[in-house]
């Protein structure tokens, strides 16, 4: 699944290169542990700056091979140090294994 984030403020913002993602259950409780960062390039994860009007996207997912699954229709997204989390509806119920992998943010341009 891919999520796009757009900076609608008038200031440049700094986001984690790999955001934190947790799947939420029906009452808003986390049903997965914090996501695992997946950086195919390896190396140290840093902050990514996004100018006003700019956008980034990232993909997240999980293996469908496991002993037990969890389900939810929203995710809690943590994108910047010291900032509150965002709750994002997924539009459909997601059933997945308990470990979620998240890829690095990719710029989309302004």
Image (cartoon, rainbow, N blue to C red):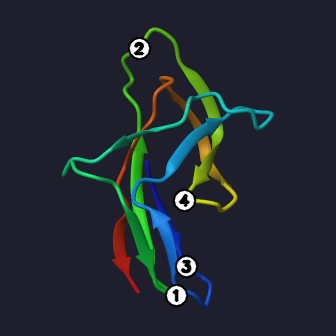
Q: Which residue is mark 3?
A: 7
Label 1 vs 4, first from the N-terminus: 1
Task: Answer above or below: position of 71 versus 101.
Answer: above
Q: Which mark is residue 29?
A: none
Q: Which residue is mark 4?
A: 79
Q: Which residue is the extreme one toward the left? A: 41
Pick the front one: 66 or 93: 66
Q: Which mark is residue 66?
A: 2
Task: Tell me the distance, in whole angstroms, between the alpha carbons under discs 2 and 3.
Answer: 37 Å
Label 2 vs 4, first from the N-terminus: 2
Label 3 vs 1, first from the N-terminus: 3
Few, some or many C-alpha atoms within 10 Å of disc 3 (few <14, some 14-19, many ≥20)?
some
In the image, what residue occupies the spot 48% across and 53% down?
A: 19
The label nearer to you, 2 versus 4, is 4
Label 2 vs 3, first from the N-terminus: 3
Q: Secondary structure at mark 4?
A: loop
Relative image position of residue 1 (x, y in whole percent): 43, 48
Task: Tell me the distance, in whole angstroms, between the alpha carbons under discs 3 and 4.
Answer: 12 Å
Few, some or many C-alpha atoms within 10 Å of disc 2 (few <14, some 14-19, many ≥20)?
few
Q: Is residue 76 left or right of residue 58?
A: right
Task: Tell me the distance, in whole angstroms, between the alpha carbons under discs 1 and 4.
Answer: 16 Å
Give yes or no for contact between labels 2 and 4 (Cβ–Cβ under 8 Å).
Answer: no
Q: Secondary structure at mark 1?
A: loop
Task: Tell me the distance, in whole angstroms, between the alpha carbons under discs 3 and 1.
Answer: 5 Å
Q: Is residue 49 left or right of residue 44?
A: right
Relative image position of residue 16 (x, y in whole percent): 46, 60
Task: Tell me the distance, in whole angstroms, between the alpha carbons under discs 2 and 1.
Answer: 41 Å
Give yes or no for contact between labels 3 and 1 (Cβ–Cβ under 8 Å).
Answer: yes
In the image, what residue occupies the spot 80% across and 34% down?
A: 27
The label nearer to you, 2 versus 3, is 3
Task: Answer above or below: position of 8 versus 47.
Answer: below
């Amino acid at each position: 699944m891919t999520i796009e984030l757009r900076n609608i403020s008038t200031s440049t913002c700094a986001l984690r290169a790999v955001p934190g993602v947790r799947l939420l259950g029906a009452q808003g409780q986390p049903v997965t542990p914090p996501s695992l960062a997946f950086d195919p390039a390896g190396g140290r994860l840093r902050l990514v700056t996004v100018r006003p009007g700019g956008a980034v996207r990232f993909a997240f997912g999980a293996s469908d091979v496991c002993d037990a699954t969890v389900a939810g229709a929203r995710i809690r997204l943590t994108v910047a140090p010291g900032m509150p989390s965002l709750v994002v509806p997924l539009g459909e119920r997601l059933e997945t294994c308990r470990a979620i992998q998240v890829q690095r943010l990719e710029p989309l341009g302004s």
